[in-house]
Image (spheres, rainbow, N blue to C red):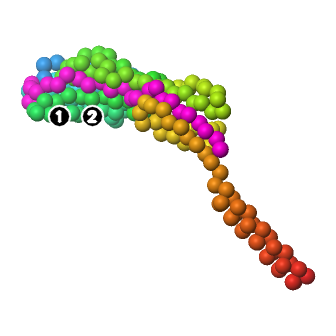
Amino acid sequence: YNEITLDVSQTARAQVNTSDAVKVNEAATEDMDFTVSGSSGTAVVQVSSTNEDGTARTSASMIREAAKQINSQDAGVRATVVEDNGEISLKLESKHTGEVYGFSAQGQFGAAVGIDQVDTAALNAEYSVTDNGITRSYTSSSNDISLNAGRIGVSLKSAGEVTIRSDMDEEKVSSAVQDLVSSYNSALKVLNDNY
């Protein structure tokens, strides 16, 4: 049998930034004019703090519009609106895990102040594999990895160590060989009978 030890020191994570929470009905005081630069490109966000009739927009209205604009552009970042207890904030998350999929936000954030601060940094998975007494270290931007030359697929869920054993089921192999021999003998009999 073959025995592989997988030791995960860190799983891959997506980057997350969340703006400061503001009151849902709070009147906006400044425009939003910022960019979010991610792995696929840059999303440009431009939201006025006033309505067409000149009245002030609410912070909630501006944050919802900013999320809509970000999600309509392919920057490799997903925007969601978080509402809790009469407060609202903008949450940005990279669409994929791994350091290469990190992003940055720059500009005038208006109601989404603080969106440029990283809550959770994008990280690569870090793990080691011991096979036949040889240990090798690896990194991956994804938590879905393969071992044993691609024959074993693994989804990393948390840090820790696991041993994977592959044994041959001798009973199944013996049964399959017996079935093969029986089929071969039957085919020979049919050929001999019809010669």
User: At 11% across and 33% down in the image, what residue appears?
Assistant: 85
Q: Is residue 128 magenta?
A: no
The residue located at (80%, 70%) in the rendering is: 184
In the image, residue 142 lies at what x, y percent?
48, 33
Taking depth in this image into account, of 16 and 25 the one nearest to the observer is 16
**Quadrant into which the N terminus falls:** top right
Q: Position of residue 145 (x, y in %)?
A: 53, 36
Callout 1: SS: strand
Residue 147: x and y, percent? 59, 37
Q: Quadrant of residue 106?
A: top left
Classify mark 1: residues with Cα within 10 Å, few (<14), some (14-19) or many (20+): some
The stretch in magenta equals 1-27
Residue for badge 2: 80
Can residue 141 be seen in the rendering of this structure? Answer: no
Whether residue 106 sits left or right of residue 124 in the image: it is left
Residue furthest to the bottom: 193
Q: Quadrant of residue 14?
A: top left
Residue drawn at point x = 30 percent, y = 32 percent? 79
| Pick the front one: 94 or 119 | 119
Q: Residue at x 40, y 29 (%)?
A: 13
Residue 175 placed where, x, y %? 68, 64
> Spatial distance from mark 1 to mark 2, Cα to Cα?
10 Å
Q: Identify the image quadrant of the C terminus.
A: bottom right
Drawn side of residue 78 relative to residue 163, left or right: left
Which residue corresponds to mark 1? 83
Of residue 11 and residue 13, the one placed in the foreground of this image is: 11
- Provide the secondary structure element on which disc 2 rests: strand
Magenta segment: does it hold 11?
A: yes
Give the amino acid at mark 2: Thr
Please indicate whether residue 68 sits to the left or right of residue 28 in the image: right
Q: Amino acid at mark 1?
A: Glu
